[in-house]
Amino acid sequence: MHLEEKRLQMELEGKRMQAVLEQTRLDLEQKRLDLRFDLEQKRLELRIDWDQEMEQQRMEMQNRLRTVGASVAIEHHGGFGLPSDSESEVEDDQAVASSPPSPPSPRSHESLSDVEWPEMDAWSTGVSIASTPRSPDPEQQQGHD
């Protein structure tokens, strides 16, 4: 009988150990799922932060470009609606604008397809940047004073 009790006790201990192992496996699986969820959540948060940072930088660059563009336009048009420094600038610009651009000459190691050619849109449409008024007409300005 003593051996039978020992066998039953060992069998019971084996089943208890299997239950402990199964519970440990379930606990580890739950921990793995929790960690995976946390990782995915962190990735999502980082992606959102990254997208917001990139959008912020894009907006800052646009603002800088607008600022630079405005200051270039102010310089190009002779200030805030004031007449430009010299009247000959307008004539020079109009003379340059009326002739098509000369193509750049290729360097000895470049083929013609490697050369960057100027855009022809302004000439093909007949619109010239230089033909737009740079400043108000001085005669009209005097009439309003």
Image (cartoon, grey):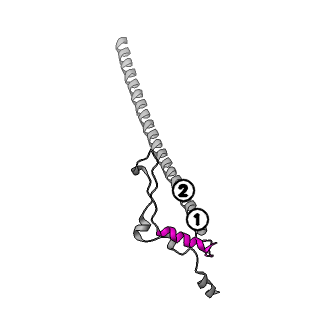
Does residue 29 lie above or below 114 as drawn? above
Identify the residue position indicated by label 2 in the image.
56
- Amino acid type of the residue tagged 2 in the rendering: Gln
Does residue 68 lie above or below 109 as drawn? below
- Amino acid type of the residue tagged 1 in the rendering: Val
Give whichever of 139, 102 is nearer the camera.
Answer: 102
Q: Is residue 1 left or right of residue 117?
A: left
Q: Is residue 2 left or right of residue 105?
A: left
Give whichever of 3, 112 is nearer the camera.
Answer: 112
What is the magenta range?
A: 78-98
Q: Are marks 1 and 2 in contact (CB under 8 Å)?
A: no
Q: Which percent across, then down, holds residue 83? A: 62, 76
Magenta residue check for 87: yes
Identify the residue position indicated by label 1 in the image.
72
Magenta residue check for 18: no
**Quadrant into which the N terminus falls:** top left
**Quadrant into which the C terminus falls:** bottom right
Picture residue at 34% right of the left edge, 14% below the top: 4
Q: Secondary structure at mark 1?
A: helix
Label placed on residue 124: none
Q: Which percent across, then down, holds residue 71? A: 60, 65
Q: Secondary structure at mark 2?
A: helix
